[in-house]
Structure formats: structure tokens, C-alpha cells
Amino acid sequence: MPTTIRAAFDAELRAARTATTGEQRWAALERAHILSQPWAWPHTRAHAIMLRVAWSEHDRREAAGQVLRLLIAAPGSALGRYPEGNTGRATVPLTKPMPVPDDLAKLLDHR
């Protein structure tokens, strides 16, 4: 993961940790997930953090979805088979590509 993308990924994870609402927390985690998709370890880490948050919120559906995503994140990234822009949440289909926010797209275009 290039240093500029790593810095943005880490910033989103910090934003998730310091968020004052669940909505803010998940928005930051979704952005971190989008940034992480091309790299196996960060992608897996994003889903592990999402699982921890879902568990702490007692959200069984989200937690179950994150367990499944944890199993396929690293292989998907390693093979270059991931749905670009997908937020990584259990509320969206696993294979559905989604629009990448403009600021993240600019970062990812320079990888």
C-alpha cells in the first residue's frame, strides 16, 4: 500500500475510533474499506475492525456478514477480484461495485 493511501487509510481508522456516533464511525470504516480493497492485509484488517464494531454494537447481522467477508477479503484482494467502491458492509451485496468517492478515487488512481 503506497504511503499516501496508507496515511488516508490510517486517518479513516482514527476517525472511526474517535467518532461520536455510530453513523460517523461506519462512514469512516466504509471509506477505510474502499481504500484497502487492492491490498490483502489492509483489506482483511478493515473487515476485522468492522467485525469488532458490529460485535460491540450487538449487530448480529453485520457481525455475521463481516465473518464471511473476513474469509474472502485477502484472497479477493490478492487475485484482484473485489468489487471496486463496495463499502464492505453486510447491508450491500458482496460483489456489487459501487461509486468511489471522488477524493478516494484520486488517491487510488495514483497507486
Image: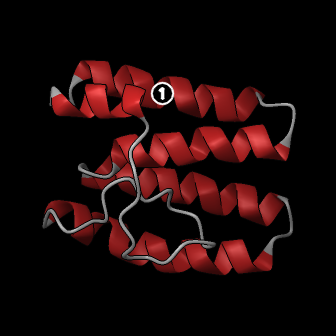
How many marks on residues?
1
93 or 44, which is in the foreground?
93
Task: Examine the rendered structure and indicate whether residue 78 appears above or below residue 94.
Answer: above
Asked whether 72 or 22 is in front, the reply is 22
Residue displayed at 54% across by 58% down = 48
Residue sitting at x 76%, y 27%: 18
Residue 110, position as x, y percentages in the image: 15, 26
Near mark 1 (Cα within 10 A), the count class, few <14, some 14-19 or many ≥20, is some
Q: Residue at x 85, y 60 (%)?
A: 57
Quadrant of the image containing the C terminus? top left
- The amino acid type of the residue labelled 1 equals Asp
**Horizontal side, residue 109 vs residue 4: left or right:** left
Q: Is residue 41 left or right of residue 54?
A: left
Q: Position of residue 45 (x, y in %)?
A: 45, 51
* Residue under the image location 18 percent in, 32 percent down: 109
Q: Nearer the viewer, residue 105 or 35?
A: 105
In the depicted structure, whether residue 57 falls above or below residue 64? above
The answer to which image quadrant residue 97 occupies is bottom left
Query: Which percent across, then down, holds residue 35?
Result: 37, 40
Q: Position of residue 74 (x, y in %)?
A: 29, 64
Residue topped by disc 1:
10
